[in-house]
Image (spheres, rainbow, N blue to C red):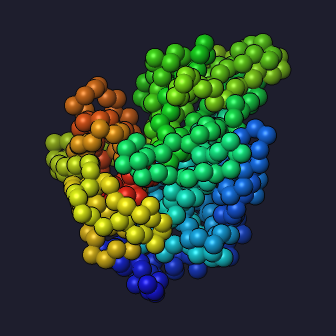
């Protein structure tokens, strides 16, 4: 099937007009301060002693870099596609203009091999976020194309070190080469887990930090399926932010496996950590895993002790997010579950797994560039929305909403903390209410971040006029 750029951009609900997205791209083509990101084939030692071929990164021999930008300052990423597949880059958790969101056929045309696209935005919120492709999503993410994105506060919060860990697993065989990236069984259940768990593409990573110093540890779960459960044995610290946004009251740092903090695909956590005083002493960063706890990384104390105290840190400043007007909120309900029998496979131009298993409100997402697919819900700008998310399946679903930030306000199974987030984890049979102000206009993708679920029907979009 062939179609023009303008046709492709209007296929899904007439989301945007082609001149909007491509006019911006042309205007930025001469930007000399852009951060270059070349999506390219890569090779690296993922499994000790073996060089894995067939990776995808923005570097030829390692993971995509940590991108750092400043809150309220313009940023441009000059993304060039050096592969034969289409791609597009999404900036997970950022409240940015819709035409910079990186969702093919909804906000832009996908980037073909040899083509470039300039993403220009000014991040309004400080915190820990990440970036990944939203075209050939399963293929490219499973092969490594995920990176941590940090938006720094205007004022230095006073840490002695800032360490980002990208938790990512890979499906490798005993020879260190890729095996099947997904399975039908996995897609119909919890997703297909990798065989090698890494931090920053390294098994049992070691990072140095000043002895007796204060470390801001940022952990992002960027897998296609795996949920991590984080704990730091015998460490001193507390959790200061979740999914990019500061907590009004810091949480206790989980130091035991039974108290581990769940991090589903797409979620992040910031920890304020005091390093041990003795040079060479270790802080272990652990996750549970099949067969027992797995050490993901070690933080090693170096030099003479700085004798810092966690009480010296000022609270992180809150991001300026509009509070929902609950007295005038509008409720919309969404059911996440199996796809009705007889649905055709999701035959997407940005990658397909060849089958359909999942749905929202019992209607599966029909695929990239499908015609006549309208929004799941439409809100007026400034309207307060409450989304009731009901999981009718026995599997967990981290539900992610692009372009908007919400509070989790209720669950039928557990007490919830009403921190700001962009990804809500629904457990088996759970119903969760989330609330937000629809203050960012556009068509915003809304999907499960287990990518096999997303690519087999559990996806849609929400429109803000």
- The front one of 106 and 20 is 106
Q: In this view, does 348 lie to the left or right of 464?
A: right
Who's the residue at 31% across and 54% down the image? 358
| Residue 410 against residue 173 in the figure, above or below | above
Report the number of discs: 0
Q: Return the residue found at the far front.
A: 174
Q: Is residue 434 left or right of residue 236?
A: left
- The front one of 233 and 1 is 1
Residue 455 picture quarter:
bottom left
| Residue 342 against residue 218 in the figure, above or below | below
Q: In this rendering, does residue 223 appear at all?
A: yes
Quadrant the N terminus occupies: bottom left
| Residue 434 against residue 252 in the figure, above or below | below
Who's the residue at 64% across and 16% down the image? 309
Q: Is residue 172 left or right of residue 341?
A: right
Residue 8 picture quarter:
bottom left
Who's the residue at 51% across and 72% down the image? 110
Q: In this rendering, does residue 246 appear at all?
A: no
Q: Where is residue 423 in the image (x, y as percent from the top left)?
A: 40, 44
Who's the residue at 72% across and 18% down the image? 282
Q: Where is residue 395 in the image (x, y as percent from the top left)?
A: 34, 39
Quadrant the C terminus occupies: bottom left
Q: Return the residue found at the far right.
A: 303
Q: Position of residue 93 (x, y in %)?
A: 47, 49
Q: Position of residue 183 (x, y in %)?
A: 47, 51
């Amino acid at each position: 099937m062939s179609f023009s750029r303008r046709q492709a951009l209007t296929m899904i609900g007439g989301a945007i007009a082609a001149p909007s997205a491509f006019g911006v791209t042309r205007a930025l083509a001469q930007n000399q301060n852009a951060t270059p990101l070349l999506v390219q084939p890569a090779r690296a030692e993922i499994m000790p002693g073996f060089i894995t071929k067939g990776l995808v990164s923005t570097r030829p021999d390692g993971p995509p870099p940590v991108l750092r930008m400043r809150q309220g300052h313009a940023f441009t990423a000059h993304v060039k596609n050096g592969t034969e597949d289409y791609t597009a880059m999404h900036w997970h958790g950022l409240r940015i203009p819709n035409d910079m969101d990186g969702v093919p056929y909804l906000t832009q045309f996908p980037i073909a091999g040899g083509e470039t696209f300039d993403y220009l935005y000014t991040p309004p919120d400080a915190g820990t976020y990440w970036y990944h492709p939203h075209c050939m999503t399963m293929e490219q993410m499973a092969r490594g194309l995920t990176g941590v994105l940090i938006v720094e506060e205007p004022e230095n919060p006073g840490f002695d070190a800032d360490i980002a860990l990208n938790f990512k697993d890979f499906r490798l065989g005993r020879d260190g080469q890729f095996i099947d990236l997904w399975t039908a069984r996995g897609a119909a259940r919890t997703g297909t887990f990798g065989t090698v768990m890494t931090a920053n593409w390294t098994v049992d990573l070691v990072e140095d930090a000043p002895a007796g110093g204060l470390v801001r540890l940022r952990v992002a779960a960027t897998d296609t399926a795996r949920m991590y459960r984080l704990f730091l044995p015998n460490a001193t610290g507390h959790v200061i932010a979740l999914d990019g946004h500061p907590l009004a009251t810091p949480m206790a740092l989980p130091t035991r496996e039974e108290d581990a903090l769940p991090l589903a695909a797409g979620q992040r956590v910031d920890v304020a950590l005091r390093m041990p005083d003795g040079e060479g002493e270790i802080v272990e960063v652990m996750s549970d895993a099949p067969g027992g706890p797995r050490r993901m990384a070690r933080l090693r104390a170096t030099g003479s002790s700085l004798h810092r105290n966690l009480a010296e840190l000022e609270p992180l400043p809150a991001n300026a997010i509009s509070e929902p007007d609950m007295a005038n909120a509008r409720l919309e309900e969404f059911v996440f579950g199996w796809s009705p029998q007889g649905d055709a496979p999701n035959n997407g131009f940005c990658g397909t797994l060849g089958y359909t298993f999942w749905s929202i409100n019992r209607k599966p997402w029909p695929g990239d560039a499908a015609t006549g697919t309208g929004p799941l819900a439409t809100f007026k700008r400034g309207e307060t929305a409450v989304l009731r998310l009901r999981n009718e399946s026995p599997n967990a679903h981290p539900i992610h909403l692009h372009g908007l930030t919400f509070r989790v306000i209720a669950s039928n199974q557990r007490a919830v903390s009403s921190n700001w987030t962009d990804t809500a984890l629904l457990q088996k049979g759970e119903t969760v209410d989330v609330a937000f102000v629809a203050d960012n206009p556009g068509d915003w993708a809304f999907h499960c971040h287990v990518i096999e679920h997303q690519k087999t029907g559990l996806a849609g979009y929400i429109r803000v006029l």
